[in-house]
Amino acid sequence: MSAPNSAGLSAGFNAAPLDAAPFDAAPFSPAENAAMQAALAAAAQGPRGANPLVGAVVVGTDGTLLATGYHRGAGTAHAEADAIAQAKAAGLDLRGATIVVTLEPCNHCGRTGPCAQAIIEAGITDVVYAVDDPHDPAAGGALTLRAAGVRVRSGLAADAALDLNRRWFDAVATKRPFVTLHIAQTLDSRIAASDGTSQWISSPESLADNHALRGRIDAILVGTQTVLIDNPRLTARNADGEADGKQPLRAVMGYRGIPDDAAVHGADGNVLHLATRDPREALDQLFASGVRHLMVEGGSRILSAFLAGGLVDELIVYLAPTLLGSGTAALEGLGITTLADAQQWEWDPASGGAVQVLGRDLRLHLRPATPATPDATSTSSDTTPHRTGADTAAGGN
Ligand SMILES: NC(=O)c1ccc[n+]([C@@H]2O[C@H](COP(=O)([O-])OP(=O)(O)OC[C@H]3O[C@@H](n4cnc5c(N)ncnc54)[C@H](OP(=O)(O)O)[C@@H]3O)[C@@H](O)[C@H]2O)c1
């Protein structure tokens, strides 16, 4: 994948095409600015996952914010439709109104119908949105709106809107899931003891943090060996051990089949066997299944394969103050034999900080190091774990 944000974004779409057409360049009013802030706040209430977080606010001709909507997940009304429905339910006439949206209104007939058409039918005459929709089937809403005589402007609060969905934007632009790699390890980098036991290396606080993350991703992946040894459920669970509402797809990678009685099947059967050892092939299959954010949990050979392939966008390491001295190393060979080829990562201050204390553990949050400006005198090879540099933006899904 490209960088977790900036490279993928620049390749995929235009964040602020204010010079695209003269009538697009009109300044944004104070009411539109206020509406965009409200739309961003509303968007953040949506569930993280395969769909982007989107918010929308309808603004009356006198600048009053009339209705706010947001997207509540796959199969539910889009933010624009939600806001329009609320305004209509309140008996408001939307003719001549403005709608302010954090993402370009869609143009596709998915499960919920095109938002561009809903806007036109409501009699809304002005659309302000933050960033273009890079998703091929959905893109084109602005063109449809303009063709119908609606004034369309974009680029308002574009940075904040990109930040809100940075992992989703990157996945869509590069056509592979954003990959978070999770390692729960001892101080001496072991993820299991020599007898195979690994539950639990981490503190209860780290486990709770991991389960919260599971509730925000689309899929979780482990190797066949981990399924055979640990028999994990791979569900997102709360402090009482109960399964949360939103569960990730459970993916198992490797040639061997999943035993019929494996816990990973769960009651819902929301499990996918990826009969491959090629991480790229696994990511292709997962992307085709709608996965935009994947968490790779292990074990050692799986973690190593994704890292060696330069396919990791974010590292979360739970470091327990525990020593084993032997057992399964977190990583086993990345094909690196000399220091000049070492993968370089940097601390990521986003989402709670680069280093957090969780019970007795430290939670380390890292991103691929931004490549240094090429030095004409340098002879060393590229040491970044990514094809391109890393994003420095905070937040995101
Ligand atoms: N502390 C933690 O965070 C954590 C998390 C998970 C697991 N673990 C521990 O990790 C240990 C298991 O690690 P592990 O390395 O032995 O097994 P693993 O990484 O879970 O699975 C390895 C298996 O996956 C398949 N595979 C798929 N792609 C592969 C690739 N590119 N390269 C190599 N193998 C690939 C192979 O089986 P096929 O023959 O089926 O292809 C291989 O035997 C367990 O003790 C478990 O408790 C710890």
Image (cartoon, rainbow, N blue to C red):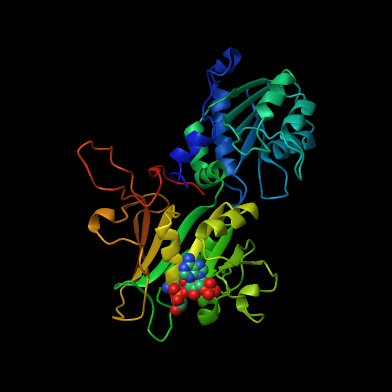
Residue occupying image coordinates x 32% and y 55%:
343
How far from the left and from the top, in percent, is residue 232? Answer: 55, 76
Q: Is residue 93 at all visible to an observer of this figure?
A: no
306 sits to left or right of 379: right
* Left or right: residue 312 compared with residue 35: left
Indicate whether 43 appears above or below 302. Answer: above
Count of residue discs = 0
Asked if 346 appears above or below 39 in the picture, the reply is below
395 sits left or right of 107 in the view: left
Horizontal placement of 71 versus 189: left or right? right
What residue appears at the point 62 percent right and 47 percent down from the top-left corner?
A: 51
Residue at 54 percent across and 62 percent down: it is: 214
- Nearest the camera: 316 or 38? 316
For this rendering, which residue is in front, 44 or 330?
330
Question: Is 396 placed above or below 189 here?
Answer: above
The picture places residue 170, in percent across and down from the top left corner, at 51, 44
